Image: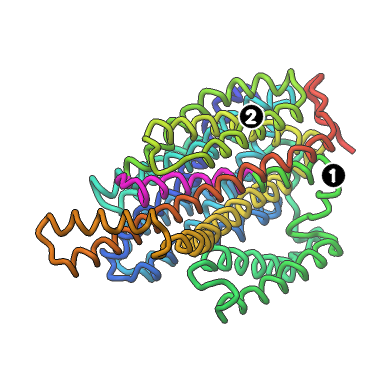
Amino acid sequence: MPDGSINPWVIAVTVTLATFMEVLDTSIANVALPHIAGNLSASADESTWVLTSYLVSNAIILPLSGWLSSVVGRKRFYMGCVAVFTLSSFLCGFATSLGMLVVFRILQGVGGGGLQPSEQAILNDTFPLSQRGMAFAVYGIAVVVAPTIGPWLGGWITDNYSWRWIFYINVPVGLVSLLLTYFLVSDPPFMKRVRLKEGFRVDYIGLGLISLGLGSMQIILDKGQREDWFASDFIRLFFVLMLIGVVAGVIWELRTKDPVVDFRMLKNRNFAIATTAMFFLGFVLYSSTVLIPQLLQELLGYPAELAGLALSPGGAVIMLMMPVVGILVSRVDPRWLIAFGCTISATALLVMAGWNLEIDYRHAVFGRMLQSFGLAFLFIPINVAAFAYVPREKTNMGTGIINLARNIGASVGIATVTTMLERRTQYHMSQLNEHVNPMSEAYRKMLASLTSAFTSAGGSTTGAASQAHGMIYNIIARQATMLSFVDDFKMLGVVFFAIIPIFFLMRRPKMSGGSVPVH
């Protein structure tokens, strides 16, 4: 067992390995869905359960990870998660039907859900508060960079090899992580496992209610747009189940002696505000990660791999800036770093709101790089501020809650921008179509010009007129879609500007001596 002589940075890199692969898996499978559907004889709609099943099981395990760590021991729990994630990744690649793949993805989500909170808790206990910024820089590279390279890497693997390899690549990394964790990581001396013989009781009711609420919420967010939200009986059913699970679960957990999720931690002002901030970080990071490649593919005609590659320079910016922010966070008030990061990211999103159909690839890449520069100033200060006044024995529970907030923020953000995209496109189409009528001189001139061009190319008069009308409709549709992307970027920018004031309600962490304040 480690005796404290092991370099803490070796431990940091060890626990980051598996986490990076797990976060990568949340986005890498998206671009492979058409390949998976075709290979397993499934429809496009059915194939989305490959994503939904993973997100549901992942969301359920995240807040329970702290409780499970206290039951079986954190090292044991973390190694169990890595083992389940690695084995289920291999089985996902081996799946011969969609049903098999969905079952194995559920197992993969169960294993993956405990990795992020466990790593964060290990880093909290391995490093003193004064060095925690740099430690979270390593963790932040995994959590923030992985989603940005996922779409590109997924596209490259599926185009050049097979969709099965997006799962197989997890296996060697998982095995290395297991081996290193066994030899290098140990539970801290102050962490005591609960024992059933000493009167500890498993909170089965809380466990069931929280699982029901979070699972139903994830299904709603992932399937809502496809099912037209509350117009669907399917969505209405899960909404009722979500309300029952979440409301009853929170009330039950606040009243029980040994909760599986300790919501009382949110009484800590710093932790509550940081959890809110992490929700919005997930909201903006993941939704913008979806929007930019989609814009490049749908409106500008870029292939999937190149559209995903537009995010990669932004990931490089985050990797370069994370260590810098890790140093700054011990010298500068984290609240000002968070405010600066939000301001830069919001400004970048408003710059994107000025995009049009004439933008080139360079502008798209630069916009994402500017946004990523701001994002790099958020993750580390938020985490340092969150746990500055949390007792050490509560760290496990806290990391589960704050990671759940980021994941829910991601799901809410993606659901919001995709719904807005469709509905604002319809709105802009109706607005633009008002100007497409015989009374408009510009419309008449364009129609006559296009009809003449098609006639000159050998078309009949009737056919040329029909082609001209079709081309005008396509132009309007593209413009309407572009305007809806602009609305999405504008909304994300306004959200980031709006939340800045709440960060100054936090207390500034005291870095002196590296001790963690306890109250």
Indicate which disc residue 510 carries. none
Q: Is residue 55 above or below residue 193?
A: below
Is 509 included in the stretch rendered in magenta? no
Give the farthest residue toward the right. Answer: 519
Three-letter residue code for mark 2:
Phe
Is 288 included in the stretch rendered in magenta? yes
Give the farthest residue toward the left. Answer: 458
Q: Residue sitting at 64 percent across and 23 percent down? A: 326
Q: Is residue 316 left or right of residue 517?
A: left
Q: Residue sitting at 39 percent across and 65 percent down? A: 438
- Kindly tell me whether residue 181 is visible in this rendering: no
* Quarter occupied by residue 465: bottom left
> How many C-alpha atoms fall within 10 Å of the one at disc 1: few (<14), some, or many (≥20)?
some
Q: Earlier in the sequence, mark 1 or mark 2?
A: 1
Nearer the camera: disc 1 or disc 2:
2
Which x, y percent locates residue 50? 42, 62
Q: Residue sitting at 55 percent across and 58 percent down? A: 420
Indicate which disc residue 377 carries. 2
In the image, 225 versus 273, the foreground residue is 225
| Label 1, label 2: how far apart the Cα atoms are | 23 Å
Which x, y percent locates residue 388? 79, 33
The part of the chain drawn in magenta is: 281-304
Three-letter residue code for mark 1:
Asn
The residue labelled by disc 1 is: 268
Callout 2 secondary element: loop
- What is the magenta segment's predominant secondary structure? helix
Which x, y percent locates residue 118? 62, 44
Callout 1 secondary element: loop
